[in-house]
Amino acid sequence: MGTLQVFKLILILGCFGSIAEGLGVNWGIIASHPLPPKTVVQLLKDNGIKKVKLFDADSSSISALAGTNIEVMVAIPNSMLSMMTDYDTAKKWVDRNVTRYNFDGGVNVKFVAVGNEPFLSSYNGSFLNVTLPALENIQKALNEAGVGSSVKATVPLNADVYTGDLPSAGRFRTDIADLMTQIVTFLNQSGSPFVVNIYPFLSLYDNANFPFDYAFFDGGSNTVNDNGIVYTNVFDANFDTLVSALKAVNLGSMEIIVGEVGWPTDGDINAKAAYAQRFYNGLMKKLASNTGTPLRPNQYIEMYLFGLIDEDSKSVQPGNFERHWGILKYDGQPKFNMDLTGQGRDVTLVPAKSMQYQSKTWCILDPKAQNLTAIGNNINYACTFADCTSLGYGSTCNGLDSSGNASYAFNAYFQDQSQVDGSCDFQGLATETAQDPSTAGCNFTIQILLDSFGYRVLVPVKAVLFHVLVSVFLEMLW
């Protein structure tokens, strides 16, 4: 083989093994047993992921990213936006969460997310008056700190900030049109991107009549014709609706980053691992091919998958699926085959290594239990504090019988409490077992150890105090 042929082969192999250009992930930590930051950062490195988006400025997470050169988007939660309307406070935030890490071998902070979807209709306008002033102050503070040319402030927004029956008719939502125009004008002047969250899954969830295949990238049976432009999937249509909305305010070429995109694997009839695998397979191929969208053809799209790891303590107000967005399970193990290169290979993500778990002990309904009339209240108690979303309609554990439901709930609480003494009792209804009660489709979790990593040390709860608290809570329910 000649030198030229060897060189070409090296190039081919190098491209084949690299993840799709512009790919990042969201790293959320709303979990009862979050993975240690160093473990998560190693996951990112092992899987070749070079961009990560956070939902706050947790110092443990940011510090763990030091020296990796992974691009980081740190965030200011919505609850802090009003504070950032004071410039001195904004300066202190930038100093504490951006410039302190700006040194050789530090953290490669590239963006500051000012809020997260602050204009959702469900917020009833709570953040309308504070988002733009906060954005302006943060960018000004970045500029004055001398990092404004490399670190940009932006506002991750839900796709509901724009509307349109067809992509070409895209316009910003009427009630916030003036505000959105001010925001995008400021972003454009600052050289900041428009960050949008697009969820084809939610199109299915919100509309029972939505064409199923149109949520994926390989359907083709359902299309939308927009004045001769044919859309084969809702992601492209949604993205181009935003492009049209930007064109309408004379910013049609503005940079767009997809801040969140993904598919959950449990908690709903359409939240299945097989569907998630299908969605990501199509998304990765699209990203790797740089095909863009009909209004922005042949352009790569920078995007952050949502999310990296399941979060079992997230609010389920939007739906039970909220706790199951991860491409990895709670313990950093892959859920399904996924090729981040977009080449469609039958491979899995690199899992978290050297994981340590609680003992192989489960909590189940005691077959000898007598006071069965109390089962309902005890299940409610367990599921108030632990994650029982897999028991819901269409979910992985929906097929269990009444005894299985009780056992699942009891075990979820037992594991959430890190198997502490007294957490498997439930007024004498529960018992510990070394026999795994999991079924083919329903997994009874064994949680990871926390203190083995030194990340969070649990303080044991005395059994007598635990029983008192349970009894008081149950009496309140009755």
Image (tube, grey):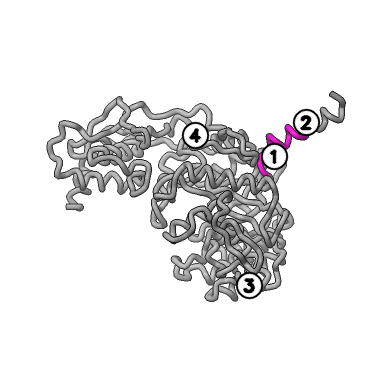
CA separation, marks 3 and 2? Answer: 48 Å
Q: Residues within 10 Å of mark 3 (few under 14, many from 20)?
A: some
Horizontal side, residue 22 vs residue 399: left or right:
right
Q: Residues within 10 Å of mark 4 (few under 14, many from 20)?
A: some
Labelled disc at residue 10: 2
Dot label at residue 333: 4
Question: In the image, which disc is placed on residue 105?
Answer: 1
Q: Could you tell which of marks 1 and 2 lies nearer the N-terminus?
A: 2
Q: Name the mark nearer the viewer: 4 or 2.
A: 2
Q: Nearer the viewer, mark 3 or mark 2?
A: 2
Q: Quadrant of residue 398?
A: top left
Image location (x, y in percent) of residue 174: 54, 75
Label annotation for residue 181: 3
Q: Earlier in the sequence, mark 4 or mark 2?
A: 2
Question: Between tags 1 and 2, which lies in front?
Answer: 2
How would you rate the neighbour count of disc 1 (Cα within 10 Å): few for under 14, some for 14-19, many for 20 or more?
few
- Nearer the observer, disc 4 or disc 3? 4
Q: What kind of residue is marked 4?
A: Gln
Cα–Cα span, label 4 and label 3: 43 Å
Q: Which residues are magenta?
A: 10-20
Label for residue 86?
A: none
Q: Is residue 159 left or right of residue 384?
A: right
Q: Is residue 135 above or below residue 97?
A: below
Q: CA distance from mark 1 to mark 2?
A: 30 Å
Q: Residue furthest front?
A: 221
